[in-house]
């Protein structure tokens, strides 16, 4: 992005990415703003809210989220009431599929389809082979994203600690990301919500082109999880690849403080500005 940064705005205990309103609807707050247009959300807050909608189903304690694919169909507005609709598309004993969508009036602005696997303890190895947990302690650079917005998701609602790369370095990046405020006020974000709030940065931190000259928009986001993430911090080891016909792919290995937990992928629309 850019090497210029600024101090983050202070967040208060009542701040959140989303606020409930009458009729069960939700409003994205100023902390959900994206870096390109203050009237539109960053992709991460809608993704986290859609994950929450899957987790809020009455039978959720029976299941673990294994995969979710989010499609960002239109700009998600800030400051306007939006409706969520969620339904179990495929019930089952061991596998279940859930569909959920975010609507602005009658228009779908974001949708998601989640695969859930039954939650049942198993006596199997629970750690990967030969994994390395990237350092996130002393000496790691905490770098806010610079933006022209007065408040914003990337610049204020998250903390980024870069192990490899930074906003302005092209190519692979390894970065720890922590939400500085909840998805919904009064609720501690779940591990899956924290992952959804982090992995949308994969294409941005690993961009191989200059953002003032190129667009590399992700119209979708897919997350695969092997287990429930633990702790506040999520680490992405992110890379981007571009084709010659206007498409690309950003992919990340996801870690928590205990090791690898999954992968994410974003399809990319790549074109000059």
Image: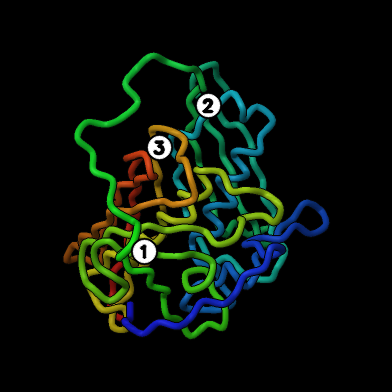
Residue 58 on image: x %, y %: 69, 30
Number of disc labels? 3
In 3D space, how far apart are the residues under numbered discs 1 and 3 (Cα atoms)?
22 Å
User: Is residue 34 toward the left or the right of residue 200 in the image?
Assistant: right
Front residue (pair 208, 132): 132
Residue for point 50% across, 41% down: 113
Residue for point 44% across, 52% down: 233
Task: Give the mark, 1 or 3, whose residue is nearer the N terminus.
Answer: 1
User: At numbered mark 2, what does the secondary structure look like: helix, strand or loop?
Assistant: strand
Q: Nearer the viewer, mark 1 or mark 3?
A: 1
Q: Judge whether 91 appears above or below 144 on screen.
A: above
Which label is found at residue 96? 2
User: At numbered mark 1, what does the secondary structure look like: helix, strand or loop?
Assistant: strand
For label 3, the residue is: 225
Is the residue marked by circle 1 packed among few (<14), some (14-19), or many (20+) residues within 10 Å?
Answer: many
Q: Nearer the viewer, mark 2 or mark 1?
A: 1
Q: Residue furthest right?
A: 22
Is the residue marked by circle 2 packed among few (<14), some (14-19), or many (20+) residues within 10 Å?
Answer: some
User: Is residue 81 toward the left or the right of residue 183 in the image?
Assistant: right
Residue 86 on image: x %, y %: 64, 41
Front residue (pair 105, 113): 113
**Image quadrant where one finds the C terminus:** bottom left
For label 1, the residue is: 161
Residue for point 42% across, 15% down: 122
In 3D space, how far apart are the residues under numbered discs 3 and 2 (Cα atoms)?
15 Å
């Amino acid at each position: 992005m850019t090497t210029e940064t600024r101090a983050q705005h202070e967040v208060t205990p009542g701040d959140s990415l989303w606020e409930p309103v009458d009729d069960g609807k939700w409003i994205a707050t100023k902390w959900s703003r994206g870096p390109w247009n203050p009237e539109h959300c960053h992709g991460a807050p809608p993704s986290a809210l859609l994950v929450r909608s899957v987790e809020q189903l009455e039978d959720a304690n029976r299941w673990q989220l294994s995969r979710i694919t989010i499609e960002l169909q239109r700009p998600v507005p800030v400051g306007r009431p939006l409706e969520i609709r969620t339904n179990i598309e495929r019930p089952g004993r061991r596998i279940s599929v859930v569909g959920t969508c975010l609507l602005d009036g009658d228009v779908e602005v974001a949708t998601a389809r989640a695969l859930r696997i039954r939650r049942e303890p198993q006596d199997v190895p629970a750690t990967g082979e030969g994994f390395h947990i990237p350092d996130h302690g002393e000496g790691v650079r905490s770098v806010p994203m610079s933006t022209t917005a007065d408040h914003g998701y990337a610049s204020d609602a998250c903390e980024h600690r870069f192990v490899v790369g930074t906003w302005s370095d092209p190519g692979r990046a390894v970065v720890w990301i922590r939400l500085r405020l909840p998805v919904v006020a009064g609720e501690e974000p779940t591990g899956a919500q924290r992952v959804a709030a982090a992995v949308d940065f994969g294409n941005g931190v690993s961009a191989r082109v200059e953002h003032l000259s190129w667009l590399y928009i992700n119209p979708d986001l897919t997350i695969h999880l092997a287990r429930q993430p633990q702790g506040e911090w999520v680490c992405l080891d992110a890379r981007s690849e571009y084709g010659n016909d206007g498409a690309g792919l950003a992919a990340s290995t996801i870690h928590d403080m205990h090791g690898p937990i999954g992968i994410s992928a974003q399809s990319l629309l790549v074109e000059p500005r």
